[in-house]
């Protein structure tokens, strides 16, 4: 039977205590972040957010789950302008489809592929209702979404300049399980945004 020396036992016990303590603190932070708002979660909101975001983000609450009930896909197309002034409109390309391709079959998918575009679109929809929205947050949502789309598209051909881009979403309700009698219209519903001009400031630092 192996006998551990006193220094080795001290190191092992100390390491075990640190790991157990860290695990307990981490689980406590996740619990407080997911639990209904309370004095502790309000007081330590900044620290809790630093632990949870972005790797452990979730869109539900501990006692009131609200899972996603829709499939939302975001597409983009661009207009380029050549040296002679000719404007060319490209075909729609699937930004969400690219994320799905990167995630599917990946045992450790990137948080960027899973959530960046989805959260950007959620942010846009939250700041743009039926009526035209004004203020800093709607403009920020537009710029954020535009730069994500431009980064995913990559630089244009040298002989062409990006003139403007357009985004659209396709939203379809998830079909109910086979045993359910619920009737749900799963046909996709499209929302097409206006063309957004692209300038040098939009492209700065993307590639």
Image (cartoon, helix red, strand yellow):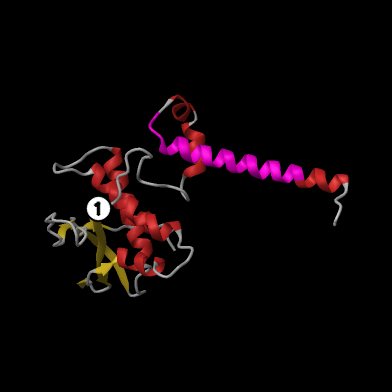
Farthest residue, direction front? 1
Query: Where 153 falls versus 55 (above or below)?
Result: below
* Residue 116 visible in rendering: yes
Give the residue displayed 44% in from the left and 56% down from the top: 111
Q: Report x, y in % for residue 66.
A: 30, 45
- The spot of residue 115 in percent (x, y) is 38, 55
Q: Residues within 10 Å of mark 1 (few under 14, many from 20)?
A: few
Which quadrant of the structure image shows residue 134?
Answer: top left
Does the magenta-highlighted stretch encompass residue 56? no
Q: Position of residue 22 (x, y in %)?
A: 62, 42
Quadrant in the picture for the C terminus:
bottom left
Q: Quadrant of the N terminus?
A: bottom right
- Residue stretch rendered in magenta on the structure: 13-37
In the figure, is residue 91 to the left or right of 8?
A: left
The reply, left or right, for residue 27 in relation to residue 90 is right
Q: Which residue is mark 1?
A: 69
Q: Give the main secondary structure of the magenta stretch.
A: helix
As drawn, 199 above or below 140: below
Asked whether residue 49 appears in the rendered view, the answer is no
Residue at the spot x=45%, y=24% of the render? 39
In the rendered image, residue 77, in percent from the top left (x then y), is placed at 24, 66
Q: Nearer the viewer, residue 168 or 200?
A: 168
Identify the element where label 1 is drawn. loop
- Pick whichever, 25 or 45, lies toward us: 25
119 vs 27, left or right, is left
- Tell me if 19 is positioned left or right of 130 in this view: right
Question: Residue at coordinates 48% horizontally, 41% vertically from top-left?
Answer: 30
* Quadrant of res 184: bottom left
Q: Residue furthest top?
A: 39
Residue 14 drawn in magenta = yes
């Amino acid at each position: 039977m192996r006998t551990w020396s006193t220094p080795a036992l001290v190191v092992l016990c100390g390491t075990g205590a640190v790991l157990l303590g860290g695990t307990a603190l981490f689980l406590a932070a996740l619990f407080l972040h997911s639990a209904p708002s309370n004095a502790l979660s309000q007081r330590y909101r900044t620290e809790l957010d630093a632990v949870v975001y972005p790797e452990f983000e979730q869109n539900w609450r501990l006692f009131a789950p609200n899972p996603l009930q829709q499939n939302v896909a975001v597409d983009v197309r661009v207009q380029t302008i050549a040296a002679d002034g000719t404007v060319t409109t490209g075909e729609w390309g699937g930004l969400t489809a690219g994320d799905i391709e990167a995630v599917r079959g990946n045992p450790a998918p990137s948080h960027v592929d899973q959530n960046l575009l989805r959260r950007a679109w959620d942010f846009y929809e939250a700041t743009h209702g039926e009526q035209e929205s004004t203020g800093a947050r709607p403009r920020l949502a537009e710029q954020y979404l535009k730069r994500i789309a431009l980064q995913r598209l990559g630089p244009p051909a040298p002989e062409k300049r990006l003139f403007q881009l357009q985004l659209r979403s396709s939203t379809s309700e998830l079909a109910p399980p086979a045993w359910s009698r619920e009737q749900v219209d799963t046909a996709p519903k499209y929302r097409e945004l206006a063309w957004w001009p692209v300038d040098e400031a939009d492209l700065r630092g993307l590639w």
